[in-house]
Image: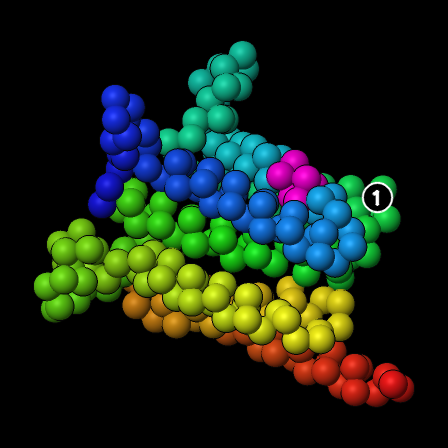
Amino acid sequence: MLPVLPIGPLTLPTRPALILLGVWIGLALAEREGRRRGIGAAPAADALGGLVIGYLIARLAALLPYGIPSPLDLIYLLRPTDPLLAPLPGLLGMSAWIAWRWRVRRVPWRTGLDALAPFVLVLAIAWALGDWAEGLRYGKATAFPLLAALGGGERHPVPLYEAALGALALFLWERLRRRPWAPGGAFLLALTLYSAVRWFTEGFGAGSPILQTVALGGMLLGLWGLSGLTQEGSATPS
């Protein structure tokens, strides 16, 4: 675990710092990908706005059952050191914001998703590293001394596995995205690779097997979508 990151005279909370770094790198890659695909930086800008809105919704949904200290103390929602989040409401809020902005800007949704694919992969890597640094989501007990040391003394460091395999997935995505995919193919490729990572790493986890089942579903959905795009491309007359 590495809850704080000393940088010279400063001491930063590691998890928020890693996530913010991942957001910055992911948005830069998304902007680059958007320009390559002829839609400019709009998807990256909308993703940033959606991320802020999704984070606030996720924080609010997670904190409401416990109550907010004071109606005037809404700054409590912005505490970056508190890992308490409700992922599903946040994801829905982020998706709704991006969908609305793309409709206003008339961004082709398949091409927009392709541009956001590296952002999703990089953010997932940064989030996993942040969870490991904070001591979150450690898995089952392991007898391997090195793995146990990285996992708090006795457990599998599942987020570290996820980050390492996520980096491999990003590398494979960078290589494979150069193929002549139909619009939407690059995003489905990222979905397939990341779902495969989560399916594998959740096998070491100590939580519910539901996440592993969801990851398997995402992997099969991505493969099915890629198969459909391949057939669509082969049926298109040259």
Q: Amino acid at mark 1?
A: Arg
Does the magenta run of residues contain 49? yes
In this rendering, would 159 be left or right of 59?
left
Residue at the (46%, 22%) spot, across then down: 76
Residue at the (43%, 26%) spot, across then down: 79
Q: Quadrant of the C terminus?
A: bottom right
Q: Magenta span covers which residues?
A: 44-50
Single out the residue that lies furthest toward the top.
Answer: 72
Q: Main secondary structure of the magenta part?
A: helix
Q: Quadrant of residue 10?
A: top left
Q: Is residue 214 visible?
A: no
Q: Position of residue 223 (x, y in %)?
A: 61, 78
Q: Position of residue 37 (x, y in %)?
A: 74, 58
Does the magenta run of residues contain 27? no
In this rendering, would 206 be left or right of 75?
left
Q: Position of residue 128 (x, y in %)?
A: 39, 52
